[in-house]
Image (cartoon, helix red, strand yellow):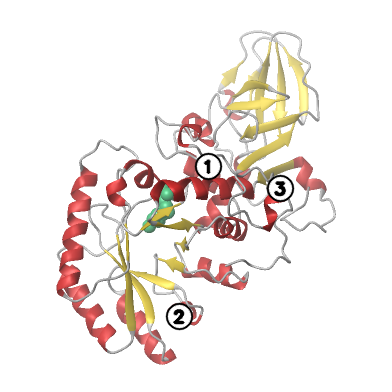
Amino acid sequence: MSIHGDPRATFHPEAAERAAVIDPAAIRHNVRTIASYVQPAKVLVAVKAEGYGHGAVTAARAALEAGADWLGTAHVSEALVLRRAGIQAPILAWLHTRGTDFAAALGEHIDLGISGWEIHHVARAAESLQKPARVHLKIDTGLGRNGCTIEEWPELLRLAAQYQERGLLSVEGIFTHLAVADEPDRRETDEQLAVYRRALELAEEHRIVPDLRHVANTPGAFSRPDAHFDMVRVGVGVYGHSPFADRTAEDLGLRPAMELRTTVANVKRVPTGQGISYGLTHRVDRPTSLALIPMGYADGIPRVAVHAPVWIQGRRYQSVGRVAMDQFVVDLGEEETDVQVGDEVVIFGGDSGIEAADWGSAAGTINYEIITRIGERVPRIVQDSGLDSGQNAGPDAAGTPDGGERRDLA
Ligand SMILES: *Cc1c(COP(=O)(O)O)cnc(C)c1O
């Protein structure tokens, strides 16, 4: 076992105390699964938010080894981190502020999503660097978040065509983002696709016909073949989680890439009526044994989670009482327990059969939020199981951890 993928690292005692064990083989498997499903469409893997909590560089390398064509980040700053790690693959960054360093993005050949105002800033950066910016124009087809409205789209196209003529930018893509693709029967997705097609027609009228039309996120990739176009942008599926309420990761052929684990910090017997944790929101109704789990909301365990599952030495138990900053409590049951201090605890992933989605249900949220909020106090340990199909496998398929010194394959 190594820390942060460096096989030469000395054993770090914290790693044994609590860890998010990341399996690049699962990421590779998931990328290939999605790619075969959407081909001939290309695959952009979203590695924003530290690769959904798995480590951006670890996730990016695994994705590229499995044949991902593009990487995606929200922020330019996140894309720059990948470049600094030596990753040369195409990267698209799509969420900008007045503080965004567009010149740095151009200097590091990072493609930019453009929703409106940014176009002037990007063109100015291109002018000063004497280097055309590669941009993907974003149309808001109904999500109501980022992206240009269809009303303002002709104006954005006019500006893009003008800057393109002046050699300041080249439009490489046109994209949009879906609002309800996780509920495949909702007709709003059809409406969004209709607006998108209209936006492509208008672009053509401005002689803007980019190679990369992209729409689908993970739910769109799985449920809407008519949204695949030239490329899909996938995140949560790559990390082995289902975006659908009624289909598990396993149903989709995906494998979770993170196992969140720790060990039992204390075990004790308590009498009927014992209150548990802050607020005493729970009292046991029989004599029972309690196990103390040394992870709390500072580690990303949601404070509001109730009756959440944990797996201790091969058995499933439930949390009781409020999750605190550093710890929470599990009820082991009335019968005499063989659970001991030091026993392994899996919160989700691994062999536990517990999904991040189960913690999502216990906390009134979704698996996305659970995996992206695992705290910095939890070391990410990259441990390559080698359990992927082998086809296209990178040099790590045999189980070498994702080493810092390894040459980037992009
Ligand atoms: C995060 C993101 C994605 C990936 O979404 P998933 O549901 O995780 O597949 C795709 N496109 C955009 C614009 C995003 O912000």
Residue extending farthest right: 10
Residue type beneath disc 3: Gln
Residue 240 is labelled as 1
**What percent of the width, then of the height, locates residue 178?**
30, 50
Residue hosting label 3:
383
Task: Identify the disc placed on residue 106.
Answer: 2
Residue 206: x and y in percent read 17, 76
Q: Is the residue marked by circle 1 packed among few (<14), some (14-19), or many (20+) residues within 10 Å?
A: many
- Amino acid type, callout 2: Leu
Pick the front one: 95 or 206: 206
The answer to whether residue 203 is seen in the rendering is yes
Residue 335 occupies which quadrant of the picture?
Answer: top right
The image quadrant of residue 58 is bottom right
Tell whether 19 sits left or right of 81: right
In the rendering, at what x and y percent does residue 336 appear? 76, 10
Q: Mark 3 to mark 1: distance in Å?
A: 16 Å
